[in-house]
Amino acid sequence: MKSPALSLTPAIIVLALAPVQAHAATLNPTLVFLDATPAMKVVMLLLVALTLAAMAVCARKLMSGPDLSGGSSFLSALRLGGPLLGLLGGAYNGLMIFMGLSRGPQPFYVVAPGLAESAMLVLLGLLCGVVAVVCHWAVEARIDRTVLSR
């Protein structure tokens, strides 16, 4: 006698695969952001705002001429704080993914948006840190040139 589990007809196979095809949408950064929890959206927006602020501080410092005040400590703090904030958000999101997985096995298409969200948080944190490092180097070089030319 055949086992009922082994006698799958093609119609049952198609019905079993239908939810996978229905939920398998191509992710992009906009969809990852829109799918994120409100707390993670705040972290993502904060990292983008800090990156833009670092570029603005750098541009202001480089165009200020001999005036050397303000901005260097912000860039110095952001060099370390940006990646840490991104890693903190990614780790928290990873914790939430594992807590969801502890309830039972999930198909990959259910877990993929959370993994993409974690990766995006880490990426934004690293981008923020890299921009801050480059801006800090540029500002420090400007300060060195100004101080040494006096």
Image (cartoon, rainbow, N blue to C red):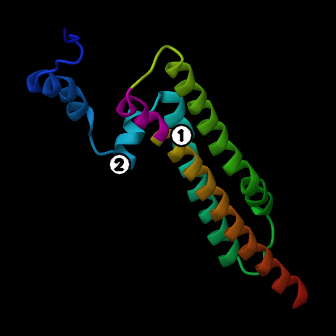
Residue under the point 75% across and 61% down: 71
Q: Secondary structure beneath disc 2? A: loop
Residue under the point 58% across and 32% down: 94
- Identify residue for label 1: 118
**Of residues 141 and 67, which is closer to you in this image?**
141
Prevailing secondary structure of the magenta residues: helix
- Identify residue for label 2: 28
Q: Which residues are magenta?
A: 107-115
Q: Amino acid at mark 1?
A: Ser
Q: Amino acid at mark 2?
A: Asn
Residue under the point 22% across and 18% down: 6
| Quadrant of residue 134 within the rendered picture | bottom right
**Residue 119 part of the magenta segment:** no
> Residue 89, which numbered label?
none
Q: Is residue 95 depicted above or below 104 in this figure?
A: below
Q: CA distance from mark 2 to mark 1?
A: 13 Å
Residue 75 location, x and y as percent?
73, 60
Residue 19 location, x and y as percent?
22, 26
